[in-house]
Image (cartoon, grey):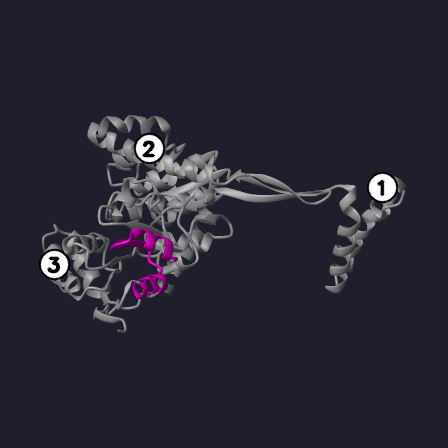
Amino acid sequence: MTIQYLKSAPGLTPENTSDTADIVQIMLARIRSGGEDVVRDYARKLDGWTGEIAVGRDQMEAAAGQVPQELRDDIRYAHDNIRGFAEAQLASISEFETELRPGLWAGQRLIPLGAAGCYVPGGRYSHIASALMSITTAKVAGVADITACSPPRPDVGIPSAILYAMGVAGADRALALGGVQGVAAMAGGMFGARPADILVGPGNQFVAEAKRQMFGEVGIDMFAGPTDSMILADSTADAEFVACDLVGQAEHGFNSPVWLATTDPNLAGDVMTLVPVMIADLPDPNRQNAQSAWAALGEIILCSDREEMAQLADQYGPEHLHVQAADLEWWRGRLRSYGSLFLGEDTTVPFGDKAAGPNHVLPTSGAARYTGGLSVHKFLKTVTWQRVAPEALSDLARVSAAISRHEGMEGHARSAEIRLGKMTPVVKRSVNGAS
């Protein structure tokens, strides 16, 4: 049996991405020219914010008084898991040195970045978890200076729960800024921040485009698009679980794809029936978001067997890949292309998005075919070193010079060979094997 699309995605009207790119390019040029004054102007026009931009550690700590104790406990529970996972990641990599040949030593060092800028979305939803994910991971990696920014609300500023989470995660300061002006201010070291070496965190199309245009001046975590999610399910899956999980991810908005691949036509039919009912039961604006995503980008795909499902998942490269099927170990070993993998019906994408521990800043739009998500690795420079002792010099210089001349690079060849001329007679006899 070939793959059958029981519900296919008609898709969205193509966006004029050149408009976004042009707007961002103009904004960045103005900010580079006018600095903090221009940023304040954008904050007033776009965020409705005229208050102080810089927020210090003392204000983060004071925000605790505006956050209910139960929510503070929940934030700390999530933070402990995220920190613990990041610490385990850090422990899995190490510095080393090795002697490749007698007298030829090489090694690896792990150097934390000096400064990071962490963008925390605050538009349609207040992303408390995003503050924890990016800032905590940078802190564990050993980044010396961390600035966070998040869109302020008029007459409020950064919501207290986000501000509290930033403090718990270890931010040195926050900026009450959203959008292009927020990431540009972090990159430029404005409002008392240290210029960021890397910009991380999810955001809307303007944030993503600003990061893309600034890449090279600063590092970025990844080129991110709308969130997406795929479920792989067989006859053992619970249709209510599957449908609810699809609806939950469609809630992100009109441009967020959700896909189900299954070997069971009965499950497919049940899910097709349940999804519209569950969407209709959501409050607004969640209902409109989910309806738009499901209508334009939702898919239900019937496959002949689990291998065909796995091949389809590898082709799609989903940001979130949730397996609700038998023999989870087979799936864990077989699947190759995903941002984060969720195994079994007792897990769900919201666990990973909010509190389980692994990072929720993940590759989208098929990028999981070639990269993973945010991790301590993004905040570490893996650099190498080498050292040559006399016993390795003769062969190393000869081979390097020969390859250089074959490439037409005479200066390189001479740089290699001049070392031989400076060798002491004792060393020359030693490397040539003379007595």
Between residue 128 and residue 142, name the one nearer to us.
142
Image coordinates of residue 271 in percent, x first then y, are 15, 60
Q: Which mark is residue 80?
A: 2
Task: Please tell me which residue is depicted at 35% across the width and 41% down the height of the picture.
Answer: 133
Q: Is residue 360 left or right of residue 4?
A: right
The amino acid on which the numbered mark 3 sits, given as a three-letter code, is Leu
Question: Where residue 14 appears, x then y in whole percent?
Answer: 30, 68
Q: Which residue is mark 3?
A: 274
Neighbours of disc 1 within 10 Å: few (<14), some (14-19), many (20+): some
Q: x, y (%) of residue 296?
A: 22, 65
Are circles 2 and 1 on residues that touch, CB within 8 Å?
no
Query: Does the magenta segment cover residue 314?
Result: yes
**N-term-proximal mark, 2 vs 1:** 2
76 drawn magenta:
no
Q: Amino acid at mark 1?
A: Val
Q: Residue at x 33, y 66 (%)?
A: 16
* Other residues around mark 2 within 10 Å, as few (<14) / some (14–19) / many (≥20): some
Q: Which type of secondary structure does the marked residue at label 3 adopt?
A: helix
Taking depth in this image into account, of 57 and 168 the one nearest to the observer is 168
**Magenta-highlighted residues:** 307-336
Where is mark 1, residue-wise? 427
Q: Relative to 275, say whether 161 is above or below.
A: above
What number of labels is visible? 3
First in sequence: mark 3 vs mark 1: 3
Residue 174 versus residue 38 in the image, above or below = above
State the separation of the CA atoms marked 2 and 3. 36 Å
Residue type, label 2: Asp
* Residues marked 3 and 1 touching at CB (< 8 Å): no
